Amino acid sequence: MKGDFHKGQINDLLIMIDVSLSKSFLNPKSVAIIGASADPKKTSSRAQRFLVSHGYKGKIFPVNPNREEIFGLKCYPNLKSINGHIDHIFIAVNGNKIIEAVKDAISKKVRCATILSGGFSEAGSEGNDLEKHVFKIAKKGDLRILGPNSIGLINISDNVILSANAMLELQDLKKGSLGVISHSGSLIGALLAHGHSRGIGFSKLVSVGNESDLSVGEIGKMMVNDSNTETIILFLETLRNSDEVAEMSRMAHAAGKQIICYKLGKSELGKELAKSHTGAIAGNDDAFNAFINYHGIARVEIFETLLEIPNLFKNKKRSKSKRVGIVTTTGGGGAMVVESLSGSDIEIVDPGLSIKKIMQYNNIPFNNNKLVDLTIAGTKPEIVSEVISQMMKNKNSDLVVMVVGSSAKFRPEQAVEPLLKWANYPKPLAVYVAPDAPEALNLLHQNNIACFRTPESCAESVKTFLNTKNPTKPKILKNTFSNISKKLKKNISKNLSEEEALEIFKDIGIQIVNYKVSFNEKQAIEYSSQIGFPLAMKVLSNQIVHKTETGGVVLNIKNLDELKISFQKLSNVFQKLKIKNSEEKFIIQKMEKGISEIILGYRVDELVGPIVVIGSGGILSEIYNDKSIRMAPVDITEAKKMIKEVKSLVAITGYRELPTTDVNIIANAVVNMSKFAFVQEIKEAEINPVIVKKGNEGIIAVDGLITLN
């Protein structure tokens, strides 16, 4: 992965790290524990006990005004009474005592503080006020804070166990190369427990809690710069400080390290009641996916995969295709992996003639299946070795899956040991061990071969690896919308009317529908003769965002009688919404027809920033949820990729005998919509629907919405 960056660029990225802060935070030479307890049953006793029991070599200063010594160490009434420098304090007190500790830390020029205590923003308005107050004081004093509500940090590499996680009662913590950053403190313990039972070691694990100061991205950059960390695992509840996470991803890629995340909140898709359909169909989770895809961060949805997938990424060659070869010693086990891969864009490839010859030579039945089933007859080290050798060297596959049956439990030399020599091969090898065989799994893991306990986790890892790309290099596009910014600065309303929005879309180069604005029935009749039937008529007001939901749209008006009835119906909508007569306006448009309808949308997502969306259009766009999303702005190449990802557009881009359209016209519209990222005044913009015409007749925007910041 380092090939995309030269040495100078890597050094430039590393400048983003405050090295002295990193040392004080992750590897402090002196620690004070505020609220230390001599009662081993209390949570507040754990930090001191764990530091000692896990071999911390630095200085420990317990602070408690009610004790003279704790666990054999001199205890101090407060920070000010300690002689000497302190790198990091661990705060296990509540309320105003936290404020006192923070002020004392600033007076002692302490760089870092971990706040174990809860009761802050997660506890309501009073806690939120306390949190703001604490961090205002800390910021002025250049004190960086982990938390609050943080279980602490665990630096296994350097024996700095500054945490209150109960799992640290374990005394034989295994050192490894996995770094972990988690919003959840309990999940830190869960990962430690799962890793302990499987011989998987960690370098550093950090619980960020409320992430009010030191962020996931900042801590991640420290781990990227850590020689003991090769892979970074994120357990996220949300995404804060996305710019820092983006920097972390670029640094990780430059350093040849992979970031893998598990994020909660998928079920909250569209929880934010956005103004536009775009906001609903591009909910927080979809926007998050667009963000991590752009920045080369892998995402998994099975918790166990977090621990099992890292070896699949270690020093492995990335490919543009997604071709997988599968070998198994158990037909059922192999079939389960194939089933778990079905429904994805993964291609199971033919093993090739060489494999068929090996099978025939060893009298193993082979029915020209893509799944190579060695059966019991082929579960021999020489056969397994020969078959895997051919599969790994086969240029027609990008990844190989090996499924091992019962022999993994009692005869690992038959089908497990022959795999070990492929540990450092550029092509990734994934091994699913079907029985409960911890020794075999441990053997594979210790040799840096990705191994899995379940077919689902194996399949998810394969899909994740093949679908994770390197971070996208930011596109440098010219800002051609400065005139739009000037125009919008004069607008005093938060929402533009449809007329105003359509004119903005016209300014960015999108053809708009022929329309007229009328203030009364007489004008409506006059304009209808100019435009020609059939017509569409809508209420026009920047106070009405979703016209359809209010009954403010009438389509396919065929004659004057229908026009008059429609006018009265729309007038009633204004009355129902209590909009003044003087503010009543009606937009009259030509009824446009085409071969398809799409939605084009742009929004500044609260988590990730500017995104652009293309999808199925019309009033059912949210139901179909058929869309493609990218970080904005995009270039023409990326826009064309987006179009290919929208299933409903397959038919108009060359499917059998159906009418087609010029894809370049749609792609240019996506590019232009995405350039709203240059216009700070715009929060959301949407055209729904865009009528797609056949051939080179183009596209026409018939309904527009723009919401300003």
Image (spheres, helix red, strand yellow):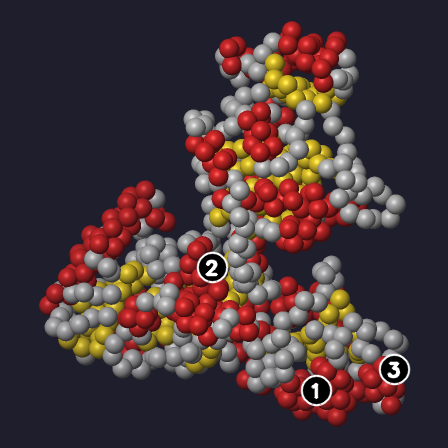
Closer to the chain start, of discs 3 and 2, is: 2
Q: Is residue 388 above or below residue 44?
A: below
Q: Is residue 366 left or right of residue 494?
A: right
Q: Earlier in the sequence, mark 3 or mark 1?
A: 3
Front: mark 2 or 1: 2
Q: Marks 3 and 1, how far apart in space?
A: 18 Å
Task: Quarter of the image for the N terminus: give it.
Answer: bottom right
Q: Which mark is residue 365?
A: 3
In this picture, residue 691 sits left or right of residue 152: right
Where is residue 552? Give x, y as percent: 62, 21
Residue where numbered disc 1 is placed: 415
Instruction: State the SS at label 1.
Output: helix
Q: Residue 471: where, in percent of width, then height?
A: 54, 63
Image coords of residue 535 (percent x, y): 72, 20
The quarter of the picture where residue 142 lies is: bottom left
Q: CA distance from mark 3 to mark 2?
A: 51 Å
Please state which amino acid type lies under the numbered disc 1: Ala
Residue toward you, 334 or 13: 13
The reply to whether discs 2 and 1 touch (Cβ–Cβ < 8 Å) is no
